[in-house]
Image (cartoon, rainbow, N blue to C red):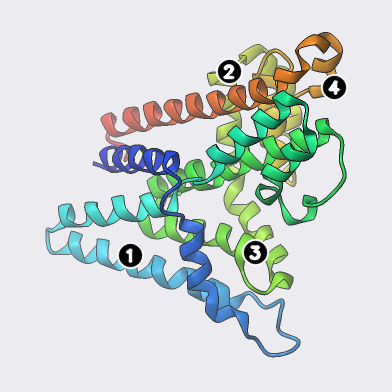
């Protein structure tokens, strides 16, 4: 049943993303509102945020446990579908990317930057960078966003149930949206630990869903090193798995100078297709695990 629950939630979420509806990030921001006021000198504390994330996770896990104990397990499935739909998703990204690629096609890089500026990490907003650097920042942000809001949630839902999935997704929200900016790096460091296994599984999936020979060339760099962060693992792996210099704008401009205007759209389409194929691989693996009775 876990496969059916995830598939329903996934396809509903994809439909909502196309309509730019139901933002889980907005719900987390409201839930974290109580963290706006802290005592002086305690701005970097993380316990309040962890409590706010652990509370709904424990409540959801308790509901599932009670339903299981009393033989009402099927009654918990609608709750799990609803929670997964809310936690997953990247609403607004489709519209931003369409506007960005349109501006890139016209050669208006200033407008392209304007359309995607808010999608980038705070440290990279407002910076005057080259079109190549801007595009790589966007593709990095897109892959991390999709990973954290789909693959990460899916992995921990299968491993530990809906409660653990909520907690992990909450950690991502804390790293991005906790009102006290001084605490966010600490939450981000915790996120790197929960990202470690699923990020490397997704890296392997990129090789299966993309150019395996190219991925093998980059695999050692992507997979090696315990401390390599999530975004680097995903970017290196995707670069090796994609053909046509989709994540190498400098090389593309040298080899296909006459097609530079179409690079932005082609590159992003290649990245999105790779992510979609990778999710299909994960769904197929989950189906095999269900058939084998592992989950």
Task: Tell me the CA gap for discs 1 and 2.
Answer: 37 Å
Q: Which mark is residue 60?
A: 1
Query: For the residues carrying marks 1 and 4, which lies nearer the camera in this image?
Result: 4
State the residue at coordinates (49%, 41%).
151
> Contact, CB < 8 Å: mark 1 with mark 2?
no
Query: Which of marks 3 and 2 precedes in the sequence?
Result: 3
Distance in Å between CA atoms under marks 1 and 4: 48 Å
Local secondary structure at mark 4:
helix
Of 287 and 86, the residue lying toward us: 86
Report which residue position mark 4 lands on.
Answer: 250
Name the secondary structure under disc 2.
loop
Q: Which residue is drawn at 55% across and 39% down?
A: 95
Tell me how far mark 2 sits from mark 4, CA to CA.
21 Å
Q: Which mark sits nearer the N-terminus, 4 or 3?
A: 3
Q: In this view, does 50 lie to the left or right of 156?
A: right
Marks 1 and 3, how far apart at CA? 22 Å
User: Residue 124: image x %, image y %?
Assistant: 79, 50
Say whether residue 282 is left or right of residue 147. left
Disc 1 on helix, strand or loop? helix
Local crowd size for mark 4, using a 10 Å CA cut-off: few (<14), some (14–19), many (≥20) = few
Q: Which quarter of the figure is the C terminus placed in?
A: top left
Instruction: Residue under label 3, please give it.
Output: 187
- Is residue 140 something that shows in the picture? yes
- Earlier-in-chain disc, 2 versus 4: 2
Residue that badge 2 annotates? 210
Image marks 2 and 4: residues in contact by CB distance under 8 Å: no
């Amino acid at each position: 049943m876990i496969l059916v629950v995830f598939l329903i939630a996934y396809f509903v979420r994809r439909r909502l993303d196309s309509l730019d509806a139901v933002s889980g990030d907005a719900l987390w921001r409201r839930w974290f509102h109580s963290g706006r006021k802290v005592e002086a000198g305690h701005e970097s504390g993380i316990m309040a945020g962890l409590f706010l994330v652990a509370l709904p996770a424990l409540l959801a896990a308790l509901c599932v446990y009670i339903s299981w104990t009393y033989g009402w397990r099927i009654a918990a499935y609608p709750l799990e579908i609803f929670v997964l739909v809310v936690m997953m998703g990247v609403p607004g990204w489709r519209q931003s990317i369409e506007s960005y690629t349109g501006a890139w096609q016209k050669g208006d890089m200033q407008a392209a930057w304007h359309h995607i500026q808010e999608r980038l990490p705070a440290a990279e907003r407002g910076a005057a960078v080259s079109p190549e650097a801007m595009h790589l920042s966007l593709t990095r942000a897109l892959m991390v966003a999709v990973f954290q809001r789909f693959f990460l949630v899916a992995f921990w839902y299968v491993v530990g149930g809906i409660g653990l999935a909520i907690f992990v997704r909450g950690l991502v929200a804390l790293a991005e949206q906790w009102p006290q900016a001084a605490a966010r790096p600490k939450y981000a460091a915790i996120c790197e630990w929960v990202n470690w296994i699923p990020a490397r599984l997704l890296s392997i999936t990129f090789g299966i869903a993309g150019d395996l020979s190219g991925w093998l060339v980059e695999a050692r760099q992507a997979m090696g090193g315990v401390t390599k962060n999530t975004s680097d693992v995903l970017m290196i792996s995707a670069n090796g798995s994609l053909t046509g210099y989709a994540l190498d704008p400098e090389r593309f401009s040298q080899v296909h100078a006459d097609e530079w205007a179409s690079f932005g759209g082609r590159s992003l389409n290649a990245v999105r297709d790779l992510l979609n194929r990778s999710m299909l691989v994960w769904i197929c693996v989950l189906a095999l695990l269900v058939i084998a009775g592992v989950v």
